[in-house]
Every structure is written in structure tokens, then in C-alpha cells.
Image (cartoon, coloured by chain):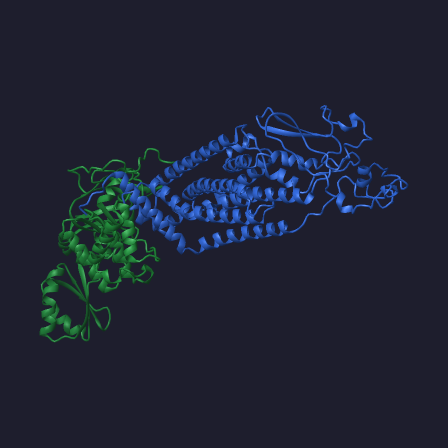
Amino acid sequence: MIPDFDQQGKAQTKEWVPEVSAPAILLENVSKSYGRIFALSNITLALNGGVTGVLGMNGAGKSTLFNLLMGKLKVSQGSVKLFGTDPWKNPAPYARVGFVPEHEKMYDWMTGHEFVSTFARLNGLTRDEAKSEANRVLEFVSLSDVAHKKIGQYSKGMRQRVKIAHALVNDPELIILDEPLQGCDPLARTTIMNVIRELGRMGRTVLVSSHILQEIERITEQIIILHQGRLLALGNLHSIRERLDKIPHRISIQTEDPKALAKDVIDIDEVFGISFPDGENLSIQTHNLGAIHSRLPQIIVENNHKVKTIDNPDDDLASILGYLTSGGGI
Amino acid sequence: MSTKPDSIYRSLDRKASAIIEFTLRQYRTKKSTWVVLGVGFTALSLIFLIYIDVMASEFESIDNDGDSTDYDNDGYPRGQEIRLGTDPWDGESHPGLFDPPIEPDPKSMYINEDGFDWDVAVRIGEQSTGYDDDGDCMDSNKTASQKDTNDNGIPCDIIVEYYRMSDGELYVNIEADSGVDEDPDEDAYSREAIHLAFVLSIGKLGFVLLLGIFLPLFMATGLIRDEMNSGTMHFMLAKPIARSEVFLYRTLGYLGIVWPYVIVLGILGAVVSGFAGSGDSFFRFADLGVWLAIIFATMMATLVYGMLFNALGVLWKYGIILAIPFAAWELGMALLSMGAPDATLLRFSIIGWALMIIDAAAMLVWPNLDLFIVMGNWGGGGGSNWNFDTSLEGSGPLGFFSSKPGLGLSAFTAMIVSTLVLLFQAAIFWFIGGALFKSKEIQ
């Protein structure tokens, strides 16, 4: 309740000059706690350029991390720097940052174009500049045709896209997207993923969070995994995956005759176990997921098996997290 | 965008206009805005209607000095007998016995026949004024000392004395020779007094208190808080803008809807009371100065309370609950300012300063207001024969609702001082609100 007089947060009366050598995002030993509960503990991270996926279950600390970056929260320990400036103390770096919050509530009474252009003026643009800028970014997220409709009439995917458009105003160098794919239909998902990939190609630093591995996989290979407030892994998704290959994996196949399929599959070297959970399913255990996946289609086609589904029940965030937290480490 | 803002201040300007515009449009979409504004308009309109009704009714004329009465039942009212020199208490002595006999005058001629006919300036010291229209003071039967009961050497006059008290304020006192201006016109006085009392009371209670507190209570408390609750504040704070700027611009946006509203209602009040008010003129132009002060004081009050309640909203989710004790305190201070305008406690309120603006303007526009109230309380003194409360209807409420600006300053200085204090208060609440907002963690 007591005002934080240490915080400067003054109106910007002289032009903010970013540190030339500073990375877009720099976190050093950052912890954020609420009483005795740590939402984030001891995160050190530097990011500059490219698309980075932030993976984590609900409550892993993704939003806390983003809110720290956006100056909404104050760090308990450590330091957060955006382009070399502490965002809690000085909002100036946001001239170069676009943020897509996860909150669903929007100004339903505005049109998409009004929403984007109004907030573009907070970047210091004139009314006319803001309007043409809004046209540009709405075009970028393929919303031009509904730009003059009320946001209240938008579908979930359009709402997410208009939020992204709002973040892209003034061509920011760093774009932070909190769960941008949540609740979107497949078409909107594809559009949003394309937009994010395009931003990465344009050399922007993009930070995108999700709790679904497959989503992130389609966007980027560079990931950060957060778990219970800790930075569990940072790096290329493939290298993480390869390490995962060393641990047993399960493949579930739903077919009409599991026993016949089992006979053919057992010949593959990498398979070390087969079980039949029920009459229609076959479960294969392997150390090398990639090898199985490359051989399996051929076997199925050659022997004319009727397969309904092939599933990797372990190939999701939960099992990766389970592996990483059980002492595997990377 | 490659185009850089022309200057930092111009870009501040753009941010301000964007948020103000946004806030105005947002108010327009909220039902609560229209409910609050509608209720305020309806409440004030009702008071205006009651006022019009009061102004259209007639105040009963009272024969304050009793000289329309025929005490001796000879058919001649007392006033006529006194004028013509017969004995009003003796049925055998009346002008009908004159040669030629004189017909009795209608009684109504002796009601309100000796009204206020004063001409004084507002300056310290004694002034002699008044004229005995009906001749009951100049009565030849009276001795010189009976004609000069106020003992200033001038027979049948009224002493009006302005003097300065230790609090620095100017006060006025009346001392009349008995029988001078003792039967004033109730209708004229009461109509004027009630008109003035109405303008002051609706200005102080209706505008500054009611609008000044309730508009910000319902409209400013959520300016930041509602956005924080719904999560939409993230959009605004994701831009390169300081939080205290957002606080200020949001408040300005709120003023953008509240100030025009106050101005429109003030103009409505000025028009209604200007046409329906007492007096012979078609429109009471002089009152416009007071209405201007009422509008200005209300604007200042909505500014300061707006900043305060907005800050309370930032402080706590249920800021409106924090605002209620403030509103109660201000109500108490409003009543105090009418009873004891120089109470030190008033300096710790917002409304005390706002009401000072109205009092100061009333002092400028109606320089004889004090004398008018004292005059009404005196009410002619009832001649020499009567000893009951002779104060005229309307002088009580007018006395209650009008007060001296306090501080013992001239009206003009009081206005400037109170305006500066209110601006200072607004700046303080902006600073506090901005600091609270800046240190607030937003989920």
C-alpha cells in the first residue's frame, strides 16, 4: 500500500536511448514470491532475436514471467532488463515492445480498427499516423475485412489476432505473446502461427507462451521450459527430444487385429516390449521413438493392417516434464 | 514507423488526447453513466420545479403595524385616523365628523404602506436612511425623543451601521426610530429572499455537494480500478506511458464528461431562476455572476473529488467504500460552513473551499446581501406597539444558506485563494494516486 517512491515512472520528458549492446531481454537471478510461495525462482535468461517458446503447465510461472517483463510486477530478487532498462521503473522501453496479454476481456464496444489506432496513439503517433499504422498491422494479421466491425462480434480467433495487431503497432523489436493460441479455431491458429513465424523471419525477438507442446513445436524450435517457477530447460526442442529418446516411450495403436500387427512389429530392433491393454489396442515400448515412427507406416501398409489411430501418449509436455523433473536433466 | 514524434511534449499531448478521447467514449457505452447523469438531472429538475411553484405563489401580506385595524369601531382604520389626527382608540373621534366629512379609506391601503426605502453603501460606519411613509413616526403628538428612539439626533430615520469584527469580516446592524419602515411588503421581500436562498442553497447543496460528490463517487472511483479488475489495463500499460500519466489522463477524460454536464445544468438553473425569479425585470442578469461561481465551484469540486476517489479506487478494490467516509465528512463540513464559515476545521475539507467561491461571488454580486438578511430579521420592528417576532419569511433560510467567505479576505481574494487551494488539493491527490498506481502490482 505504501507508494514505492524508489520507482521513477515519470512522464517521458526526454528521449529514451536504449543501451546499444543490451539484449532485448535480460533476467538475472530473478525471483518473484508471494509471501512464502515462489512464483518464479532464480531465473537467469538472456534473449535476443528469434522466436522462443515458453512452455509450462498452468501455474508454472509463464504469466508471472511476462508480467515481470511488462513492468506489471516488481521482482522480489534479481533484476529484469528490457533493452538495458528496468521496466518496473521506466516504461520507456515499451516503445520497442509489443505485448499480447492472455486476458480475454477486451473493449467490445470498439471496432478492431478503433482499438488498434487508439492505442497506437499511446506510442506517440498522430491520429493519422495511428490510422494508417492500424491498417498496416490489421492487414498483417489478415483482419482487414472485419477491421470496422465491433470487437464484440469477433470470434475468439479474431480477438486474439486484433490483440496481436495492437502489439505490432510501431513495429516493435520485441513481441511478447501470452497464450496467443488459446481457444482459437484451427484457421486462426494457422494464421497466428504464420504471423509469429513471419515476425521471427523479420528478425524480431518473439516470446510466445503455451502449455501445449505441439503448438510451440509448429512455431519454433527454441524453447524455454518452466516448471513450478523454475527454468527447467532452455534450448533447441530437437536436442531435448533426442535426449528424450533415450528413455522408454510408449506408442499406442488402435487396430482391428492387434495380435497380427504385434507379430510384424516385434521384428523391429528398437522395440523391446509389447502389450495388449484391451482387444483393440496395441502398446509398443521403445527407446527410439524416431526409428519406430519411420518404420511403422511401411509395416502397416505392407501387411495391410487396418489402423485407426497412432498415438504417443508420452510425447506431451507432461511426460517431458515428468522426465526432466525425475532427475534426467539436460 | 520511421516518423519520429516532432517533440517529446507533442507526443505527451497525443497520448493525453488518445486516453481522454477513449475514456469519453468508454463512458458513453456504460449504462451506469447514463443512470448517474439522469438521476442527477431529474433530482435537480424537481427542485427547479418546486422553486418555480414557490415563486408563482403569493406571500400573504401582513399588516405588521396594525394600522389597517379599526380598533374603535368607527369605520376608520387606525392609519387613516393617525394621518388625519383623530384618536384611533376613541369611537367618537374620527374623520367622519370633519366638515366636510371624509370617507373611510379601504383597509388595504394601510397594509404594507411603510416599506423599506433605504439607500446605503457598504462602508464602515453609521449611515442614516429610511423614510416614514405613513407618518406614524412624524405624528405631531410625539415628542422629539419619541421620534428619535435611536438617538442619533435625526428624527424618524434608520441607522445602518457596518463594522468589522475581530474575525476580519464585515457585519451590519440596524437601529430604527420606532414607526419608520415598520410595515414592509412581505410578498416583495419574501419572494426576493427565497429566490436568493434558493440560488445559494441549490448552488451549495444541489451542485457542489450532491453533484460534486456523487458524480465522482460513481464515475471516478472505477477509472483505474475497473480496468485493473477486468485485465484491460494491460493494453494501456503495454505502451510507453507512465502510470501517473494514465491516472491523470483518465481523470481528465472523466472531467470531459462531468464538466459539460455541470455547465449545462448550471445554465439550466441560471435560466430557470433568471426568468422565474422575483423582481420586475424580465431576466435577472445580475444573478448570472453567482451561477458562474456555482458552476466553477462544482467543476473544481468534481476535479478534486475525482482525483481523490480515483486514487481510492487504485488503493483498494472496494475504493467506493473508502470514499463514503470522505463523502460523509464533506457533508458535515458543508453544513458547518453554513453555520460557522470561519471554522478552522473547514480548511481540512474540500467542500469548505469550494463553497467559499460561491460565498465570495454572492458577496460581489449582491453587495447588500448582509443588510438584506438583517433587514428581514428585523422586519420593521412591528412599530412601537407590538412585541413579537417580526422577522419576514425567507430571511431565515437566506441567513442560513449565505455565509461570509471566512478568512477575512475580500471577496475577490477569497475566490482566488480558494481556487488555488483546490488546485493544490487536486495536484496532491494526483501525486498520491499516481504514486499508489505506480507501486501497484497488476496481475
Q: Is residue B209 visible?
A: yes
Residue in view at x 76 percent, y 43 percent: B110
Q: Which chain is blue?
A: B
Q: How many marks?
A: 0
From what the image shows, is residue A88 above or below residue A254?
above
Query: Which tint was used for chain A?
Result: green
A163 relative to B24 in the view: left or right = left
Of B302 and B110, the residue lying toward us: B110
Quadrant containing the N terminus of chain A in the rendered view: top left
Query: Where residue B274 sits: x, y (%)?
Result: 55, 47
A271 w.r.t. A28: above or below: below
> Does residue A1 show up?
no
Residue B88 vs residue A253, the one in the foreground: B88
Q: Is residue A304 left or right of residue B230?
A: left
**Left or right of A166 on screen, residue A202:** left
Percent x, y for residue B260?
43, 48
Q: Position of residue B386 (x, y in %)?
A: 79, 36
Residue at the image position 58 percent from the left and 45 percent from the top? B281
Q: Is residue B207 above or below residue A140?
A: above
Give coordinates of residue B320: x percent, y percent.
47, 46
